[in-house]
Amino acid sequence: MANLITIWNENRHEKINSTVAEIYPTGIHGCIESILKNAGFETKTATLDEPEHGLTDEVLNKTEVLIWWGHIAHGEVKDEIVQKVQQRVLDGMGLIVLHSGHFSKIFKLLMGTSCDLKWREADDKERLWVVAPGHPIAEGIGEYIEIEKEEMYGEHFDIPAPDELIFTSWFTGGEVFRSGCTYTRGNGKIFYFRPGHETYPTYHHKDVQQVIINAVKWAKPVARNRPVYGNSQPLENPTAN
């Protein structure tokens, strides 16, 4: 029975950048795991340099929702692991892609586009406006989330039109960005959430933490089998009178 929330992180910045290591002494994955454990979830972390990137068949088959953070090592993720993650999403596993995970192999594969964007690392203030206040991912959040310093992402964001747009960001440089997007692929639900540059303490922000908790609850699989495809016999006898 799948009941695990797995937090995947390439875990490279934490090893080479003292600022990141100071902000996230247990890694970005460790910070997010602590948030979710405190919220009552069963959790596990996985990182790039583990065998099979920590995403063995056993782990993936137990995972209800996979959270993905990556940045400088997207190309090192093995294609066969990406394909296994894609299949699990199609079968119903939830996927939450954070910040620079927009350029990950798995997100680009599931979106079918370049997922490119504009960016600037210059201590911009970010204000994420809630544009779908009735959505469960926005539960407990006010009209907006304000982050004092963040990396800027700007439009055009080369993604398919989201099924639902939950947050739209504004930055002090004047840019806007679709920063909270949901999709369905097969039986699986996907949420992309923009904030989370590694040199800022974004994942210590209480509203950002609440969004991640809400998104995990939303992305959990529903209790149903994946549809059967291929040649099918008629349910009714078309020649019967």
Image: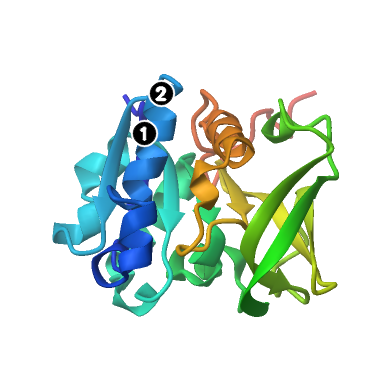
The amino acid pointed to by label 1 is Ser
Say whether residue 142 is visible.
yes
Quarter of the image that includes the C terminus = top right
Q: Secondary structure at mark 1?
A: helix
At x 51%, y 31%, the residue is 221
At x 28%, y 71%, the residue is 78
The amino acid pointed to by label 2 is Asn
Q: Residue furthest top?
A: 40
State left or right for residue 54 relative to residue 234.
left
At x 57%, y 47%, the residue is 186
Q: Secondary structure at mark 2?
A: helix
At x 36%, y 37%, the residue is 33
Quarter of the image that includes the N terminus = top left
State left or right for residue 215 relative to residue 10.
right
User: Relative to 35, is 49 above or below?
Assistant: below
Which residue was labeled with disc 1?
Answer: 34
Q: Is 121 in front, or is 91?
A: 121
Q: Is 147 in front, or is 191?
A: 147
Q: Residue furthest left?
A: 51
State left or right for residue 173 relative to residue 191.
right
Which residue was labeled with disc 2?
Answer: 38
For the residues bearing labels 2 and 1, Cβ distance under 8 angstroms? yes
Tell me if mark 1 has few (under 14), some (14-19) or many (20+) residues whose alpha carbon lies within 10 angstroms of its own.
some
Residue 38 x, y percent position in the rendering: 41, 23
